[in-house]
Image (cartoon, rainbow, N blue to C red):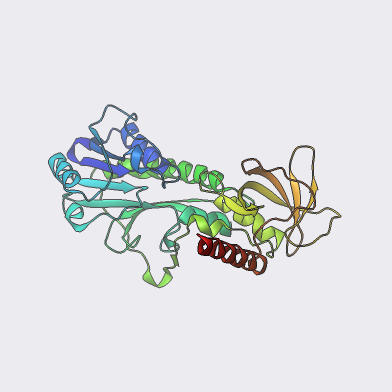
Amino acid sequence: MSESRRIVLAGSVSFSRVTLEALVRHGANVVGVLGLDRAASKDVSDYARLDDVADLDYRDFTKINSPDVVEQIRAWQPDVLFVVGLSQLVGDEIMNIPRLGSIGFHPTRLPEGRGRAPVAWLTFDEAAGAASFFVLEKEADAGAIFVQEPFGVDRGAYASEVIESVRAAIGRALDRWLPRFLGGEWNPIPQDEAQASFWGRRAAEDGLIDWRSPAAEIARLVRTASHPYPGAYTYWRGRKLVIWRASEATLPFRGVVGRILHVASDASFLVQTGSGTLRVEEWDAAGAKIAAGQKLGIVAEDAIPLLERRIAALEEELKKR
């Protein structure tokens, strides 16, 4: 049955790999695989290789819409193109190649949560999601849905745990739907546009901690930005300090916002926030020797005058030369 549909998959993360593994497991006729070249993966969180899933016709790419990639897809003559876990937008030329169409993936309960950084927003909001496979269209995440498998996000879950939940939901969704799809079904259900909501981009700099925020909110930011993402961060004596794990603490400590109140024997430490204290459990800063009484973060009111004095000193030095 599967031989009647020639399938190509393009992707770059673990969601792509899980999808490809399911296609192979169900005997799909995968005629080609496009995986993001490792050299182009620097800014791709949760990057995954696809070349060792099975004995398939595979090629790396850097830009999905480059002429050589377009020609390769055309040579594979796909009936369906799966685009899963790829941040690059697929252009019209590629979209017009598959005989039946292209299928995209998004880990939210579409039409809710269309757009960018879905795992991060699900983690931050502690909101339930869904493994959703849909018809790929020009408008992001707006196509009719083939299958949708819900999953929960536990209170206090880290981004890596949400990613694991998404992977499991992908497996369940495809095990339920692929037999029908490979048997010839193509019956996606249009989304309800009246229920659509949209999520914006998150970037590495959005992980900057404002110590005036409540401890619970900072802990939530830490969980959202943690592995495999770049991490929530602050500054310690001018050096960047990345915080990977932290939790709200209920201990009899009180201090100035941003100051370290206590350092435990396991190197975890307490920081005063705008409301409550935060226990920093896992952190990374080269050469940092954390001690009680030190202050984290950068205070603009202090930093700007210091920079002005340094600039003035440099200008004076240049005049003497």
Q: Is residue 235 left or right of residue 249?
A: left
**Residue pictured at 60% horizontal, 56% vertical:** 221
Q: Residue furthest right?
A: 252
Q: Residue furthest bottom?
A: 194
**Residue pictured at 75% horizontal, 54% vertical:** 271
Of the pair 104 and 310, the residue shown nearer to us:
310
**What is the quadrant of the N terminus in the image?**
top left
Q: Position of residue 257 (x, y in %)?
A: 75, 62
Q: Position of residue 310 (x, y in %)?
A: 60, 62
Q: Is residue 56 left or right of residue 131?
A: left
Of the pair 312 and 100, the residue shown nearer to us:
312
Q: Can residue 12 be seen in this snapshot?
A: no
Q: Position of residue 13 (x, y in %)?
A: 40, 42
Up/down of 236 relative to 29, above or below: below
Up/down of 193 relative to 30, above or below: below
Q: Position of residue 167 (x, y in %)?
A: 46, 42
Of the pair 188 and 203, the residue shown nearer to us:
203
Residue 79 sits in which quadrant?
top left
Number of on-image labels: 0
**Residue pictured at 47% horizontal, 46% vertical:** 166
Q: Is residue 229 left or right of residue 76?
A: right
Q: Can residue 9 be seen in this snapshot?
A: yes
Q: Residue furthest front?
A: 320
Q: Residue furthest top?
A: 55
